[in-house]
C-alpha cells in the first residue's frame, strides 16, 4: 500500500496498486486489468486539487513517466502533449518552440490533464480557462479503447471531456491551440479596496488580465494588471534581487511567518491582516507570458472557489465583507477575485455566462469550515458553481440545477464508463453513482 496525500493535506488515500504506464498501450492495459477485476482506477495528477477528486483506494495511475510534447505544428500553433506533463514543463517546452498558451492560472505544478479536467483557469474578461484552448483529446476508455475527440469528431464527448473530472476515461494526450510567444507588461500595486470595487467592470474590460486580492481587515487590495506588448517589444524583467525580495522573502517567507504567528495567537490575525494590507508594494516589469502568469506559492493553504455571474460580483462581495468580521475564527489569507468569458464546455464553471471568480483561503492548520460554509451559502444565492478542484460540499442534486448540460454529461459518462471504473467517493457525491 502506498500512502498518497494531496498538496494541502486535505485528502489522503492508500491505493492497493499504482500503475506507472509509459505509453498509451500500457495505459489501456492497466485499465483493462482493473476493469476485468471489478476495481476502480483514478489518475493521480500532481495532487494539487484541494478535493479528493484524485483519491484512489483501489487502483491509481501515475503518469509521471508519460510526459513531454509528442508533436508540434509550429506554423499552426497546434501542440500535442502527453497527459502527465506539468504546466511548468509544458511552458518551458513551448518557449523553446517560440509558442505560448493564451492564458494560464498562477500555479504551474498541475499536470496538463489534471488542470483541464478540474477546470483550471486564469483571468481575463475576453478569455476562457485552459480547457478552452484544447483542439483535441485522446482518451483511453473503460474498455481500453483509445479514442480521439474534437469539435468535429465525437463532439459530445469533446464537450464533456474538456472538463471531465477524470470521470470519462484516462486522458492520454491533449492537443492545444497555442500561439506565438508574447510578452506581458505587469503592473502590481496596492489600491484602496473601495476604488477597486467602484472601477471593477471598467478595469476588467480595459485590461487583458485583471485580478485583485483583498486582505480581510485591511483597506487596500493588491491589484494585478497584465497586458500584452506589441511584437518586438523589449523584455524588462524584474532583477533577480527584486524578484527574490518581493516574491520569495516578502510573499513566502515573511507572509508565512505572519500566518504562523496568527495561527499560534489568533487574536493577532486581524491586526496582522491590516499590517499586511498596508505594506503591500508596487512593481512594474515585462517578461515572457508564462513568467508573468505563474507565481511560486510556498505558503500552504486550503481553498474554496466559486464562479458566479459577473454581474452579481458586487452584491456577493459586499455580503462576504459583512460576513468575515462575524466569524468565530479570523481569516489569515487574502481573497482573490478574477474574471473569465463564457464558454460552451458542459461542466465548465463559466458555461453559458461571463463569470467572476471569488476564491477564499485559510492558512493550513487554522479553522476554516465556518468560513467556507458561509461563503458557499452566499454564492449559492446567485447559482455559484464550485471549482472542481477546490473545497465545497455540494452534491449532484444541487449541481444539476447549476449546470444546464449536467444530464448530458451524465449521459456521455454512462456511454463510455457504464460500470463506473473511473469513479471514486468524490465523484459519487458530485455526479451521483453510475
Image (cartoon, grey):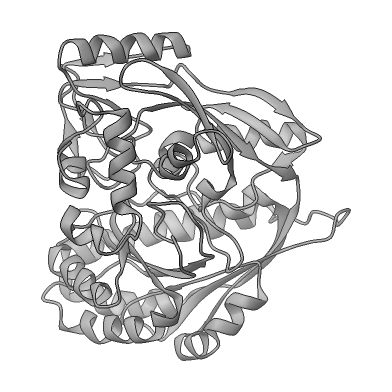
Q: Residue furthest left?
A: 328
- Residue 153 as seen in the image, left or right of residue 30: right
Which residue is nearer to you in this view: 63 or 232? 63
Q: Quadrant of residue 361?
A: bottom left
Q: In the rendered view, does 374 fall on the left or right side of 134?
A: left
Q: Position of residue 190 (x, y in %)?
A: 53, 78
Residue 389 seen by the camera = no
Figure check: 397 above or below 167 = below
| Residue in the foreground of this view, choosing between 166 and 210 | 166
Which residue does the image show at 33% across and 75% down from the upper left? 273
**Residue 427: % across, % down:** 21, 41
Q: Quadrant of the N terminus?
A: top left
The answer to whether residue 282 is above or below residue 111 is below
Query: Foreground: 219 or 59?
Result: 59
Residue at the right extreme of this rendering = 232
- Is residue 27 among the parts visible in the rendering? yes
Q: Where residue 106 appears, x then y in whole percent? A: 50, 53
Q: How many marks?
A: 0
Is residue 177 placed above or below 380 in the rendered structure? above
Q: Is residue 317 left or right of residue 121?
A: left
In the image, residue 125 above or below residue 147: below
Residue 205 image-quadrant placement: bottom right
The C terminus: image quadrant: top left
Which residue occupies 41% across, 37% down?
114
Residue 204: x percent and y percent? 58, 76
The foreground one among 351 and 320 is 351
Q: Quadrant of residue 262?
A: bottom left
Residue drawn at 35 percent across, 21 percent down = 62
Amino acid at each position: 500500500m502506498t500512502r498518497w496525500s494531496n498538496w494541502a493535506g486535505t485528502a489522503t488515500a492508500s491505493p492497493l496498486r499504482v500503475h506507472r504506464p509509459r505509453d498509451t498501450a500500457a495505459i489501456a492495459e492497466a485499465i483493462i486489468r482493473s476493469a476485468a477485476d471489478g476495481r476502480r482506477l483514478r489518475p493521480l495528477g500532481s495532487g494539487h486539487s484541494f478535493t479528493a477528486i484524485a483519491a484512489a483506494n483501489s487502483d491509481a495511475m501515475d503518469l509521471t513517466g508519460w510526459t513531454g510534447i509528442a508533436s508540434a505544428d509550429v506554423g499552426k500553433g497546434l501542440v500535442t502533449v502527453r497527459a502527465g506533463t506539468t504546466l511548468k514543463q509544458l511552458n518551458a517546452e513551448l518557449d523553446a518552440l517560440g509558442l505560448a498558451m493564451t492564458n494560464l492560472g498562477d500555479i504551474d505544478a498541475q499536470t496538463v490533464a489534471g488542470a483541464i479536467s478540474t477546470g483550471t483557469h486564469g483571468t481575463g474578461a475576453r478569455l476562457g480557462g485552459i480547457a478552452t484552448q484544447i483542439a483535441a483529446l485522446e482518451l483511453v476508455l473503460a474498455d481500453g479503447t483509445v479514442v480521439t475527440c474534437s469539435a468535429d469528431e465525437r463532439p459530445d464527448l469533446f464537450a464533456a471531456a474538456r472538463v471531465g473530472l477524470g470521470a470519462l476515461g484516462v486522458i492520454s494526450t491533449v492537443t492545444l491551440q497555442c500561439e506565438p510567444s508574447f510578452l506581458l507588461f505587469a503592473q502590481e500595486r496596492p489600491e484602496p479596496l473601495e476604488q477597486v470595487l467602484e472601477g471593477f467592470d471598467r478595469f476588467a474590460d480595459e485590461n487583458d488580465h485583471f485580478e485583485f486580492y483583498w486582505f480581510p481587515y485591511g483597506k487596500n487590495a493588491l491589484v494585478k494588471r497584465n497586458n500584452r506588448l506589441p511584437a518586438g517589444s523589449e523584455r524588462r524583467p524584474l532583477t533577480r534581487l527584486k524578484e527574490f525580495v518581493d516574491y520569495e522573502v516578502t510573499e513566502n517567507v515573511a507572509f508565512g511567518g505572519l500566518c504562523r504567528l496568527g495561527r499560534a495567537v489568533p487574536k493577532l490575525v486581524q491586526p496582522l491582516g491590516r499590517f499586511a494590507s498596508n505594506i503591500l508594494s508596487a512593481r512594474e516589469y515585462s517578461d515572457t507570458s508564462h513568467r508573468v502568469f505563474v507565481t511560486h506559492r510556498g505558503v500552504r493553504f486550503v481553498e474554496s472557489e466559486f464562479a458566479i455571474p459577473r454581474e452579481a460580483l458586487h452584491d456577493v462581495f459586499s455580503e462576504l465583507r459583512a460576513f468575515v468580521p462575524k466569524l468565530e475564527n479570523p481569516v489569515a489569507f487574502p481573497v482573490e477575485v478574477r474574471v473569465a468569458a463564457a464558454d460552451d464546455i458542459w461542466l465548465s464553471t463559466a458555461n453559458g455566462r461571463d463569470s467572476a471568480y471569488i476564491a477564499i483561503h485559510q492558512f493550513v492548520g487554522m479553522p476554516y469550515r465556518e468560513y467556507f460554509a458561509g461563503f458557499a451559502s452566499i454564492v449559492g444565492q446567485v447559482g455559484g458553481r464550485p471549482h472542481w478542484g477546490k473545497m465545497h460540499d455540494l452534491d449532484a442534486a444541487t449541481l444539476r440545477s447549476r449546470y444546464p448540460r449536467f444530464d448530458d454529461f451524465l449521459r456521455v459518462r454512462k456511454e463510455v464508463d457504464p460500470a463506473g471504473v473511473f469513479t471514486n467517493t468524490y465523484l459519487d457525491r458530485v455526479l451521483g453513482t453510475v
